[in-house]
Every structure is written in C-alpha cells, then in structure tokens.
Image (spheres, grey):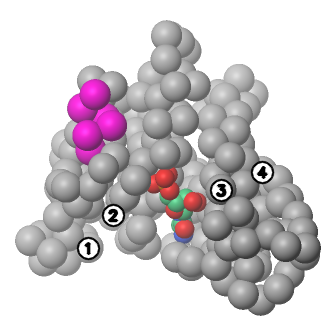
Amino acid sequence: SKSIAIFASGTGSNFQALVNAFAGRTDIVIRALVCDHADAPVVAKATRAQIPVIVVDYRTAGSKTTAERRILAQLPPIDLIVLAGYMRILGPTLLNAYPQRIINLHPALLPSFPGRTGIEDAWHYGVKVTGVTVHYVDAGVDSGQIIAQVPVPITTGMSLEDLTAQIHRVEHQLLPATVRQLVQGGTI
Ligand code: GAR
C-alpha cells in the first residue's frame, strides 16, 4: 500500500476530494496533512477526517529551510507528497528528500498562467480555453514535468465565478484520478 501526505494552505476542497476518493481504500492511505496556517479551514477538514495534522508556521520558523526541516522531522514514511493548494514554493530541503515524489495541482493549462492566480489570470487575459494541470514539482514556479491536463473552455457570458466553479469541479476529479494512476501504474 502507498502512503501519501497532502500539503494545503487554505480551504482544502481538493484535500477533501482526495479524502473522499480514498476513503475505505487500503492501497492508498493519506497519512498526514501539512499546513502552513493553524487556522486554515483545511485543518478542521483533516481533524474531522481523523488525519494527523502537521502545522508549520514559516514566519516563526524564520527561514524556509528551518520550516522544511521541521516538516521533514514530523512526516511519517510516505511514498508521495501531493500539493493541493499549498501556497509556498518548495526549497531544496523538501525537494531533495522526495525526488520525483512531489506533485502539484495548478488551476490553469501550464505553461500558461503559472503562479498564485491562474484562474483569474486566464480569465482576464481572455483565453478561450484554460484548464487544470497536475505536474511534478521542481525548483521553479509551476515548471516541473506535466503529468495530466484537462481543458476547460471559457464560453461567452461565463463569469469569473462560473469559471472558478468549473475549474474546481475538474480539479476535484483530476487530482484523485492522477494519484490513483501513479499508484496503479507503479510510478510510485
Ligand atoms: C486550487 O484551485 C489549486 O489549484 C490552487 O489553489 C486552489 C486550492 O483550493 N493552487 C494554486 O493556485 C497553486 N499555484 P482548495 O484549498 O479548495 O483545494
């Protein structure tokens, strides 16, 4: 069986989608949530799902390296890290500890619209197709090798709110499906 840790910073709707998708499965087990804010809604979701929570505040840690060492020290043995709305760029401490074992969800079709506001940036640019990407994490910003993408058309009359809801619906399907595929394909 494969063990995963999920890193998330905020709402945690994708964390919840992963919890729901893997509930009752013994081949994929969520061992921990890592969060950088103790009061983020995702923390309450993990507590409710009885998933151990590791909170590391980067500001009190003082540096990214110290924060990542604290995370590493608390993580149980895992096969995969899934970044699901984790709003931090990973440094070498975590990247070197899990080579080719960290994936990220991004709410746009990379390499277009990297960064924290991919949905809004695509909408304001006026592209007719955006989407969702799952990719390996490297030292850059949303620059690692792409694993899976699903397009989302931006149709006439669609509001930013409509697009945001549609992107999230696609994310909630694609992220669990991609983790399943990596496990069942023997990649991790
Ligand atoms: C998701 O849309 C995810 O793609 C995005 O944050 C959101 C988290 O939502 N990630 C990024 O923008 C990373 N650059 P959630 O907390 O409800 O899962």
Using the numbered discs, state the Cα–Cα distance from disc 2 to disc 1 in whole angstroms: 9 Å
Q: Position of residue 34 (x, y in %)?
A: 30, 48
Tell me the amino acid under the disc marked 3: Ala
- Confirm or reject: label 3 Cβ below 8 Å from ligand 1: no
- Magenta region: which residues? 43-48
Question: Which is more foreground, mark 1 or mark 3?
Answer: 3
Quick one: SS at disc 3?
Answer: helix
Q: Is residue 64 left or right of residue 152?
A: left
The residue under the point 42% across, 60% down is 86
The dot on residue 171 is none
Tell me the amino acid under the disc marked 4: Ala
Q: Are marks 1 and 4 in contact (CB under 8 Å)?
A: no
Using the numbered discs, state the Cα–Cα distance from disc 2 to disc 4 in whole angstroms: 26 Å
**Disc 2 or 1, which lies upstream in sequence?**
1
**Disc 4 or 3, which lies upstream in sequence?**
4
**Disc 2 or 4, which lies upstream in sequence?**
2
In reply to whether residue 171 is colored magenta, the answer given is: no
The dot on residue 165 is 3
Residue 172 in the image: above or below residue 19 = below
Q: Is residue 18 left or right of residue 88?
A: right
The dot on residue 64 is 1
Q: Residue furthest front?
A: 157
The residue under the point 24% across, 32% down is 47
Q: Position of residue 154 (x, y in %)?
A: 85, 69
Using the numbered discs, state the Cα–Cα distance from disc 4 to disc 3 in whole angstroms: 20 Å
- Badge 1, how many Cα within 10 Å: few under 14, some, many 20+? some
Question: Which is more foreground, mark 2 or mark 1?
Answer: 1
The dot on residue 148 is 4
